[in-house]
Image: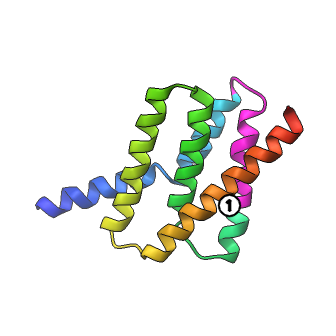
Amino acid sequence: MEMKWRKELARDCIALGGIPFLVLTIVRVSVIHAYYPMQFIISSAVFFILRAIFRCASRAGIGLILVIFTSIFYNHFLFTIFASLIYIGIITSLFYLKKEKKEIIKGILLGALSATVGYLIVRAIFF
């Protein structure tokens, strides 16, 4: 019984790095600013293209993209700490649920690469 709630909590935490939460975030930032959604959209597109080439834990990559760009969007230190702690929870949950370590690391790296590419493209276009 005790392990069941831990697995459920881990699955809930991983859901924060999923596609539905990504779409929800894109819609949220679209309401206020014109260029913020483009960071998410371009980074996500790059990530999914890379993910088609290299097998990885998608939630690790999407979660990192969400942490980076929501932290930029809100531009508040406490929110950045909170988002980072949630991301650490996602990664910890992936390990707890016994996802392959190599896939998790590749997901993190591909997420970082995708976020960098998305950020640079948006900076070049809008600024």
Q: Residue at x 68, y 44 (%)?
A: 40
Q: Residue at x 28, y 53 (%)?
A: 9
Residue 17 as seen in the image, left or right of residue 116: left
Compared with 74, 47 (above or below) is below
Q: Nearer the viewer, residue 24 or 34?
A: 34
* Position of the N terminus by quadrant: bottom left
Residue stretch rendered in magenta on the structure: 31-47
Seen in the picture, residue 88 relative to 32 is either above or below; the reply is below
Q: Position of residue 91 (x, y in %)?
A: 41, 58
Q: Which residue is mark 1?
A: 47
Q: Is residue 6 magenta?
A: no
Task: Give x and y (percent) for residue 105.
Answer: 50, 68
Residue 34: say if magenta: yes
| Helix, strand or loop for disc 1 | helix
Q: Is residue 77 left or right of residue 95?
A: right
Residue found at x 48% / y 34%: 80
* Residue 83 image point, x, y percent: 45, 39
* For residue 3, side relative to residue 88 (left or right): left
Quadrant location of the C terminus in the rendered image: top right
